[in-house]
Amino acid sequence: RKYGKNLFPYGMNFAVGGSGVFDTGNFQKNLTAQTDDFVAQVDEGVFPNLDLSRSTAVVSISGNDYMHYQEIGGSMDGLKDFIPRVIKQLKSDLKRIQQLGLGKIAVTNLHPIGCTPYTTIASSYKECNQTVNLAVMYHNALLADAVADLNKNTTSTPFTIIDIFHAFTSVLKQEMKKFKDALRPCCLGESSFYSCGDIADGVARYTVCDAPHLKFYWDSVHPTQAGWRAAFASLGTSLNSLLN
């Protein structure tokens, strides 16, 4: 509240790291609870209606629901039923955000999870897991249908999809042509017992590459700054049209 008025022009972030559409097992606020926070701010009059009508809300779902699904023993076959549930709840939350009177709402589709080091470690970082990426494409297809339906039934706030999947895929294809180890992350645990950033008995149990600026992935799931820069360069035109 002390600095809010000066920072409002740059937007407000209600996101919670590690969260998802549903609960992901770490006691973070899920998307519905994050939306509750936004609604509460609107109800308190924090955002003038004119500001809302000229603002764009960005809703980002990165796959934590599916990682949690796997961690609790979910099967690939079961994803056929779980993915539609994720999209149904996401659509409900998007509709609720729409009712606040924003100018635009953008939602990210899923990046190619089958190309993350978390998945490609099984092939020694040599190739993407196409079975996982097929599940991602199913999620993205259902999301596209949901957004099309939302747009068909609104005369006010338009929805758009930020195509993270295509941006990541196009960058990675170029990287894999240039480098043998394009899918290998910069930061790695020294064994399967450790992850990037782990410290045991005061000793770092991970290694960091010499040139992070030449890597797309930082750790098992997150891109490097250079990776994000390349992805956003790929998104350039669509992002500019969204924000202008």
Image: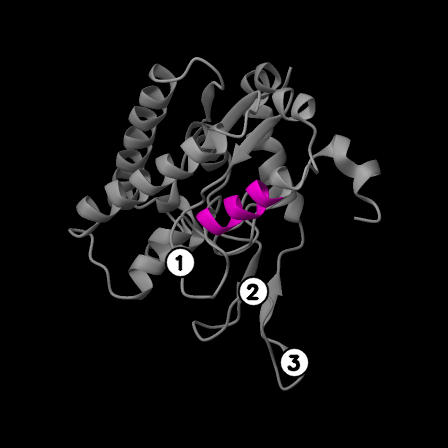
Query: Horizontally, is 221 left or right of 46 in the view?
Result: left
Query: Horizontally, is 21 left or right of 209 in the view?
Result: left
Whole-Å distance between the Cαs marked 2 and 1?
A: 24 Å
Q: Measuring 48% from the left and 16% from the top, which residue is drawn there?
A: 156
Find out whether the residues at labels 2 and 3 contact each other: C-beta distance under 8 Å.
no
Q: Is residue 65 above or below residue 230?
A: below
Q: Position of residue 184 (x, y in %)?
A: 48, 51
Answer few, some or many: residues within 10 Å of disc 2's Cα (few below 14, many 20 plus, some between 14 and 19). Answer: some
The tag on residue 196 is 2
> Which residue reaches farthest front?
44
The tag on residue 23 is 1
Residue 110 is drawn in which quadrant? Answer: top left
Residue bounds of the magenta highlight: 32-40
Which amino acid type is shown beneath numbered disc 1?
Answer: Asp
Residue 7 visible? The answer is yes
Whole-Å distance between the Cαs marked 2 and 3?
A: 13 Å
Q: Main secondary structure of the magenta part?
A: helix
Task: Tell whether position 151 is magenta.
Answer: no
Which amino acid type is shown beneath numbered disc 3?
Answer: Val
Whole-Å distance between the Cαs marked 1 and 3?
A: 33 Å
Q: Position of residue 73 (x, y in %)?
A: 25, 65
Find out whether the residues at labels 2 and 1 contact each other: C-beta distance under 8 Å.
no
Answer few, some or many: residues within 10 Å of disc 3's Cα (few below 14, many 20 plus, some between 14 and 19). Answer: few
Count of numbered circles in the view: 3
Q: Is residue 156 above or below residue 32?
A: above
Q: Which residue is mark 3?
A: 203
Q: Measuring 68% from the left and 21% from the top, which residue is drawn there?
A: 50
Residue 174 visible? The answer is no
Q: Measuring 45% from the left and 44% from the top, which residue is drawn there?
A: 62
